[in-house]
Image (tube, rainbow, N blue to C red):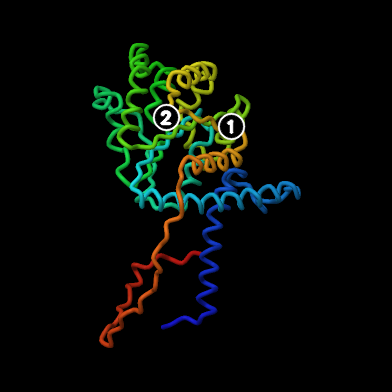
């Protein structure tokens, strides 16, 4: 059965609105803990609403450019690695969500490795990261990376001082090897204040949907704020190299941090829009003897909504 033209347009419009709702869901998640009822925008001033409108306008524009960048990477067979580092609750996951939301997961994928197991702890330190590096035409985003050794492992005593020193000797050479092999390596540090982390941790504690984000390690990192600061300063000083410099994102304002990071990421590539071939939807083949069999009622998901 062929749908009327007006019905096709209506459904296409609804599909577009559904995609916008995904952004609103993320927005509500950021602004309101679970259990809060009422209009998500209730209480906003006109300035607040205009700020949100401007944010979404820029976000959609940047996501459109990221799709062009993805097509360019696939077309030119570039290999791209992007590292996201920062304190707990600095907003790394939020920007990664926005970067990847409209992209093809076969081209752009996220790597978030757990703590090394007993076998991995006996390997060359960088060994477990190597299998996740991109092939031609791929982008890999590391949600934390080999820099765990300079941060959490050092501060929490999970490695020796000698192992940390060896890391600092090795990592510049390791990254230069990646760059020489043709990988574009971009490193971001998300910077927040002591007060902002405190507030974000409180938000997670009181939001049942976000409590899973708080591990005992996160809580201990809060107590050791100054130790992490010293570790971060040493890391940036000793691993900021010309082939793979660090870029610091001011992340106290989550929305600005996302937009600034996405804009900066795009600026690192001389990409251009790849012309796509015209797509024509073929007519469906119909056979007079085809009979669609009904699905048993016991297999149907109840329509609660």
Q: Does 17 sit left or right of 243 as displayed?
A: right
* Vertical placement of residue 161 versus 257, above or below: above
Specify few, some or many for label 1: CA neighbours under 10 Å numbering under 14, 14-19, or 20 or more.
some
How many numbered marks, from 0 up?
2
Q: Rounded to the nearest whole Å, what is the CA distance between mark 2 and mark 1? A: 19 Å
Q: Secondary structure at mark 2?
A: loop
Q: Does 302 sit left or right of 293 as displayed?
A: right
Q: How far across and how far down the image is residue 170, in percent?
A: 33, 20
Viewer-proximal residue among 37 and 160: 160
* Vertical placement of residue 63 versus 288, above or below: above
Q: Does 116 sit left or right of 42 as displayed?
A: left
Q: How far across and how far down the image is residue 300, in percent?
A: 37, 68
Q: How far across and how far down the image is residue 209, in percent?
A: 52, 43
Which comes before the other along the chain, label 2 or label 1? 2
- Which residue is labeled 2 in the image? 244
Question: For the point 24% across and 26% down, which residue is it?
Answer: 119
Q: Does 246 sit left or right of 255 as displayed?
A: left
Single out the residue that lies furthest toward the right. 46
Question: For the point 33% across and 73% down, which residue is it?
Answer: 295
Question: For the point 52% across and 43% down, which residue is it?
Answer: 262
**Quadrant for the N terminus in the image:** bottom left
Single out the residue that lies furthest toward the bottom. 288
The quadrant where residue 179 appears: top left
| Foreground disc of the pair 2, 1 | 2
Specify few, some or many for label 2: CA neighbours under 10 Å numbering under 14, 14-19, or 20 or more.
some
Viewer-proximal residue among 176 and 301: 176
Q: Secondary structure at mark 1?
A: strand
Q: How far across and how far down the image is residue 292, in percent?
A: 31, 79
- Which residue is labeled 1 in the image? 250
Question: For the point 39% across and 16% down, which residue is it?
Answer: 157
Viewer-proximal residue among 119 and 181: 181
* Vertical placement of residue 50 versus 175, above or below: below
């Amino acid at each position: 059965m062929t749908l009327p033209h007006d019905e096709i347009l209506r459904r296409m419009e609804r599909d577009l609105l559904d995609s916008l709702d995904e952004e609103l869901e993320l927005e509500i998640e950021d602004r309101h803990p679970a259990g809060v009822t009422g209009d998500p925008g209730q209480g906003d001033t006109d300035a607040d609403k205009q700020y949100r409108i401007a944010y979404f306008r820029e976000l959609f524009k940047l996501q459109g450019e990221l799709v062009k960048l993805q097509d360019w990477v696939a077309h030119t067979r570039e290999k791209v690695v992007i590292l996201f580092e920062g304190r707990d609750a600095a907003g790394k996951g939020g920007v990664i969500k926005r970067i990847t939301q409209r992209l093809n997961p076969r081209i752009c994928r996220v790597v978030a490795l757990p703590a090394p197991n007993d076998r991995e702890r006996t390997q060359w330190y960088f060994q477990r990261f190597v299998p996740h590096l991109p092939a031609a035409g791929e982008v890999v985003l590391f949600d934390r990376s080999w820099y765990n050794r300079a941060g959490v492992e050092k501060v929490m005593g999970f490695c020796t001082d000698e192992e940390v020193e060896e890391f600092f000797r090795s990592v510049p050479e390791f990254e230069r090897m990646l760059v020489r092999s043709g990988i574009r390596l971009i490193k971001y540090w998300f910077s927040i204040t002591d007060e902002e982390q405190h507030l974000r941790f409180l938000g997670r504690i009181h939001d049942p949907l976000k409590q899973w984000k708080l591990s005992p390690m996160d809580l201990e990192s809060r107590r050791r704020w100054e130790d992490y600061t010293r570790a971060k300063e040493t890391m940036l000083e000793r691993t900021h190299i010309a082939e793979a410099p660090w870029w610091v994102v001011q992340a106290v304002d989550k929305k600005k941090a996302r937009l600034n990071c996405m804009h900066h990421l795009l600026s690192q590539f001389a990409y251009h829009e790849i012309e796509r071939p015209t797509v024509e939807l073929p007519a469906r083949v119909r056979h007079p003897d085809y009979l669609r069999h009904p699905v048993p009622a016991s297999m149907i998901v109840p329509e609660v909504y």
